[in-house]
Image (cartoon, coloured by chain):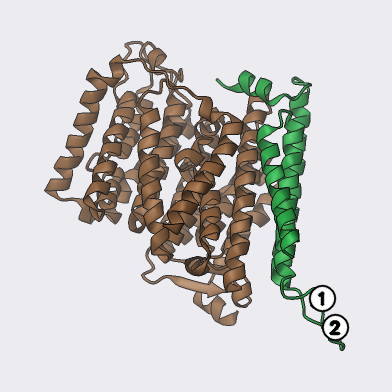
Amino acid sequence: MSVLEAYIFATLLLGFFGIIFKKNLMMKIIAMDVMSTGVIAYYVLIAARGGFYTPIATGAKPGPYADPVPQAVILTAIVIGFSIQALMLVGVMKLARNNPTLETDQIETNNMP
Amino acid sequence: MNAFLAEMPGVIPWIALPFFIGFGINLVPKLDRPLALVVTLSSLVYGVMQLLQPLPQTVELLGHFGVTLMIDAFSGALILTNGLVTLAVLLYCWQTGKSTFFYTQVVIIHGSVNAVFVCADFISLYVALEVIGIAAFLLMTYPRSDRALWVGLRYLFVSNTAMLFYLMGALLVYQGNHSFAFTGLGSAPPEAIALIILGLLTKGGVFLSGLWLPLTHSESETPVSALLSGVVIKAGIFPLVRCAMIVPEVGGILALLGMGTALLGVGYAIWETDSKRLLALSTVSQVGFMLAAPPVAGFYALTHGCSKAALFLIAGNLPSRQFAQLAKLPIPPILRGGMAIAALSIAGLPGLGGFAAKTLATKDLLPWQATVLNLAAVGTAIAMAKFILIPRHPTPAPQPARGLVLALVLLVGAILGANSLGLDAYTVASGVKAIGIIALGGLLYYFVVGRWNLKLPRGAERIEHLIGVMTLMLTALFWMVVT
């Protein structure tokens, strides 16, 4: 369990530092996605602390259940994250017409009054 | 559930209305403006109803795992602010030929800001804040220019990264309490508190986490700037204040950060030569007053929202954004008058709503805290003096558009009317103090600040630094929570 947690935090940090250090706008967006993958995995991990089985009421009782609440919540967050991702990619597509290299420094210098 | 509906009639239809209308508008594009008007009027009525309500009402939908709502006079004040500012923006845009898409986004952002003002659990708050982020992005990028796209993308980067930290905090609160309700924050581990506060500080444009705000609010279109600075920013402040009321130790941290942001904002603002940037920086400073004084935060947000929206609408219609240019160009007298009233209200002149809010905010503080805020108030007066003391130009100016005049009448009326909520602020001592602060600010502007030309570096506003500063704030917050 704690090894998994360490991996999740590594994913999170890699994503976060990717947002800061990657120069290309596209790569920054992908890094943000990596970071949100880390957060989602953390929710799933916490939900599985008590047990692994899906809480569906059937006759047989297989063992300790996973907590459904964080999973339900993170489903909403996944949908929101994905729509924001889509929106950002559309923005980048439009920006790419005049800034084909998508270098963040360049775009920022051109657009800071 | 049934008990709930009996307790708070109309809350669900009122919350749902903007979303139905927001999307429904696209089916009847001809009715976009009247339908948007219906939504804002419903919020005005609902806000006033809640403002007059003596007792807070808390409701849990579907047990303690579900949605928690809480409505009190504080929510009422903010809902009223939202209604007033959105109404002013609608009046302003009425004859500017904006597309239905624009009104869809305005209605949706209005609805989700309302949702923030009634929710009392971290997940509803998360959803509402993210919807605000998306709608704000679409409003910012409405002109489709490269600069607008960049400003919007930059905003989404910062807000989405902050919300990822927030989500982790929310999970840690759940782990400790098996509930996402705000009340769980008290027993949450320190890292949860630090992560959640970091997310909300960034959304609310507070202190170093708020350095994204000046560019975003100044480069958006005029009505969008008014909307963003008038109410949307309070969607980040509201939950912070709510948490400060529920958990006292969080309140202490937020008061400290509030003072920091109050000074940081004016520190930048007094040297600014661009009118819209000055207003945005002043917002960074004004949110500090709300955080420092949670009990009056609602009233403060109301007066600040109306004044700042009015100033943004006017600044966007002046012949230039540079103060140095404005002295050589004609300004219509109506705009000059509106500008003076709104700027004096933010500076805190007795007779205007801002005075009552500022007096009540600094009344119950510790002496050193009050000193810091008074210092920030002098700085605000210096910054606002730039608007009030623009030299008059003899040539007649063209008449401003009718929508703008109507919006200004509404906002100025609200600034004056807000006084009725803070009548106990009117004492001789507080009046003399407020006039003294404004006079001192005016003199300092005239003799010192106005004669210097200081250009502050803006490197901290680059996107890498905006994201990187989150690590610094997170460390600082964690340290503050632990000690």
Q: Is residue B118 above or below residue A109?
A: below
Q: Is residue B309 above or below residue A75?
A: above
The amino acid type of the residue labelled 2 equals Pro
Cβ–Cβ below 8 Å for labels 2 and 1?
yes
Chain ID at mark 2:
A
Q: Provide the secondary structure element on which disc 1 rests.
A: loop
The image quarter containing residue A103 is top right
Q: Residue furthest left?
A: B428
The chain in green: A
Q: Is residue B271 above or below residue B199?
A: above
Residue B99 picture location, percent across and down: 67, 36
Residue A64 picture location, percent across and down: 77, 80
The image quarter containing residue B329 is top left
Residue on which the image places disc 1: A53
Question: Mark 2 or 1 closer to N-term?
Answer: 1
Q: Work out how far the residue at label 2 is from the one at label 1, CA to CA, in angstroms.
A: 7 Å
The amino acid type of the residue labelled 1 equals Tyr
Residue B463 picture location, percent across and down: 60, 32
Q: Provide the secondary structure element on which disc 2 rests.
A: loop
The chain in brown: B
With B111 as the anchor, is B226 left or right in this view? left
Say whether residue B104 is visible: yes
Residue A62 is marked as: 2
Q: Confirm whether circles 2 and 1 share one chain.
A: yes
**On the rendered image, what quadrant is the C terminus of chain A found in?**
top right
With B185 as the anchor, is B290 left or right in this view? left
Q: Residue furthest front?
A: A3
